[in-house]
């Protein structure tokens, strides 16, 4: 499964979210081409990732985690589309 994790971090300077970034990069396969958006190929569902990340942000921040289905469009680099096609089919 591929999930999309996106956020608005407003409570602290971005440098103070190092633990959040570290947790996201623990996934075996991830893609982070857009500033506040990650695609993660994982066996964990959105609820599991929510539990993992909730303590790494504040109540004033915003977080959205959804499963990505193979119905997508956008304006991205070839490298990004290759990653998406590899992990979503």
Image (cartoon, rainbow, N blue to C red):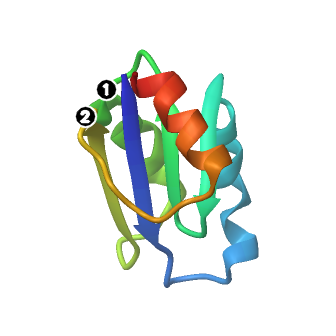
Cα separation, mark 1 vs mark 2, equals 13 Å
- Image location (x, y in percent) of residue 61: 40, 74
Q: Nearer the viewer, mark 1 or mark 2?
A: 2
Residue at 46% over, 37% down: 52
Q: Which mark is residue 32?
A: none
Q: Is residue 54 above or below residue 49?
A: below
Q: Is residue 57 above or below residue 46?
A: below
- Image location (x, y in percent) of residue 81: 54, 44
Residue 47 in the figure: left or right of residue 82: left
Q: Secondary structure at mark 2?
A: loop
Label 1 crowding class (10 Å Cα cut-off): few <14, some 14-19, many 20+?
some
Q: Does the residue at mark 1 contact the one at mark 2 (Cβ under 8 Å)?
A: no
Residue at 48% over, 30% down: 85
Residue at 35% over, 42% down: 50
- Check the picture and name the quadrant holding the C terminus: top left
- Check the picture and name the quadrant holding the N terminus: top left
Residue at the front extreme of this rendering: 78
- Residue beneath disc 1: 45
Q: Nearer the viewer, residue 41 or 56?
A: 41
Q: Which mark is residue 69?
A: 2
């Amino acid at each position: 499964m591929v999930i999309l994790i996106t956020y608005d971090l407003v409570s602290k300077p971005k440098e103070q979210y190092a633990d959040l970034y570290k947790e996201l990069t623990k996934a075996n396969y991830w893609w982070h081409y857009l500033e506040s958006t990650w695609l993660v190929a994982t066996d964990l569902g959105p609820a599991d990732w929510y539990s993992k990340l909730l303590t790494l942000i504040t109540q004033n921040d915003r977080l959205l985690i959804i499963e990505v289905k193979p119905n997508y469009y956008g304006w991205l680099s070839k490298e990004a589309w290759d990653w998406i096609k590899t992990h979503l089919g």
